[in-house]
Amino acid sequence: MRSRLLAALGAGAALALLAACGNGGADGARPGATGKAAGDEVTVGLVAPSTGVYGLYGPVLGGIMKGVFGHDGTSGLTFEQADDAGDPQTALTKVRQLVQQEGADVIVCCVNGAATLAVAPYLESVGVPQIAPIPGPGGLGEFSTAYSVGFYAQQLTKPFGAYAAQELGYKKAVIMASDFVQGHDVADGFKEGFTSAGGTIVKEVYPPLDTSDYGPFLSQISDADVVFGFFGGADAVRFVKQYAAAGLKDKAQLIGLGPMVSRLVLDQIGDAAVGVEGVFHYAETGTASPADEAFAAAAAAAAPPEVTPNFVQANAWTTAKVIEEAIKESRSSGDSLTEAIAGTHVDAPWGPFSFDPTTHYPVLKGLLFQVVKGPQRLDHKVLATFEGEK
């Protein structure tokens, strides 16, 4: 884990991370690895990018969480937000500031998987619980105070790789993913599942983050019946559009981890996304349960009416609900906030939500959906479900 973090962070952030892994006396470390119980006043800090290639995530996460906290009226709750621009070293700096200067009791962080891992040792050293709000890297179970509302990449991509070979009948695959920690995690999971079930990986291609022209990478696709991809934000918009423009949709089925064709980017991609398939925990098909209806109402209140509820909003809503319930439980029982978070059960927009006590990630099922043309907009049509890895 430590060598992986150092490679992801670079020299400057690595030194800061190593310092954070100690007892943190200079940072005012709190006694006990799991921290303290919720007091009358609780500060929640969100660290997420509002600028950079993933800059659309921060405002969406913050908007929903503020809306939930304001609407439900949890007493004594203060919400603070900071922009890390998707950079691990910046994330660590912002988290330290929120803890040391703003007295943050809970940190919601991060969007970039390397940043999520970068802040976990520091937050453990000072006993402040961390909740990662969207799908991210594996390994948070190694830190006593770190939990994730989003799944880790292999939790869905490994079983889906096996499903693609065994149930969907794909024989040869090309993997294309952004060249960063989470991109490789996504790819490794699919590769392991696909090859263990008899499939062959023809080629792996890793364009850098914030690529504008995917032509040189798309030209490497050949002799495959499926392309499994992972791109997010502006990269997802460009990749899916250019995949269609290159005439590849009729040659190899494009399937990606959910953010590649989520509602967050779907309208920007347009008809180029029709027929593309996604693998995720949540399909944006409309309301189907009381929790989904409550989430949709919160999303509508926090965003312009033309914005359809999306997975980032759904995860933000669930994160806020977990925090609210944990505060209530901690105040009532005297358990630390971390212990209360670990034991929280809520109804998420996609179904019952709880944390696995060993991995610290959610217990969930995977969905395979396809982008289709609806009467008013592009929609998700669920094709199948499969079990996520424990």
Image (cartoon, helix red, strand yellow):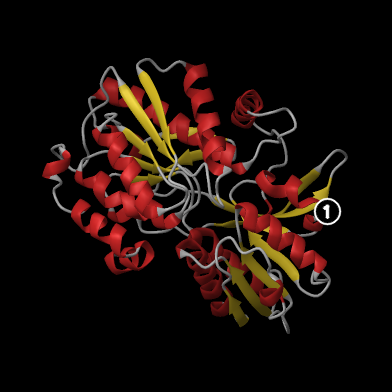
Which residue was labeled with disc 1? 271
Q: Quadrant of residue 243?
A: bottom right
- At which x and y percent is residue 141? 33, 53
Tell which of 123 and 370 is nearer to you: 123
Farthest residue to the right: give it. Answer: 375
- Residue at (65% x, 29% y) in the render: 303
Question: In this orientation, does residue 83 appear?
Answer: yes
Depicted 207 relative to depicted 21: above or below: below
- At which x and y percent is residue 272? 80, 57
- At which x and y percent is residue 2? 27, 65
Compared across the picture, whether 55 is left or right of 123 comes to: right
Mark 1 element type: helix
- At which x and y percent is residue 112? 46, 53
Question: In this orientation, does residue 351 appear?
Answer: no
- Residue at (69% x, 64% y) in the render: 255
In this rendering, the count of numbered labels is: 1
Q: Quadrant of residue 278?
A: bottom right
Compared across the picture, whether 187 is left or right of 91 comes to: right
Q: Quadrant of the C terminus?
A: bottom left
Depicted 279 relative to depicted 243: above or below: above
Amino acid type at mark 1 = Asp
Q: Residues within 10 Å of mark 1 (few under 14, many from 20)?
A: some
- Residue at (25% x, 55% y) in the render: 16
Depicted 356 relative to depicted 176: above or below: above
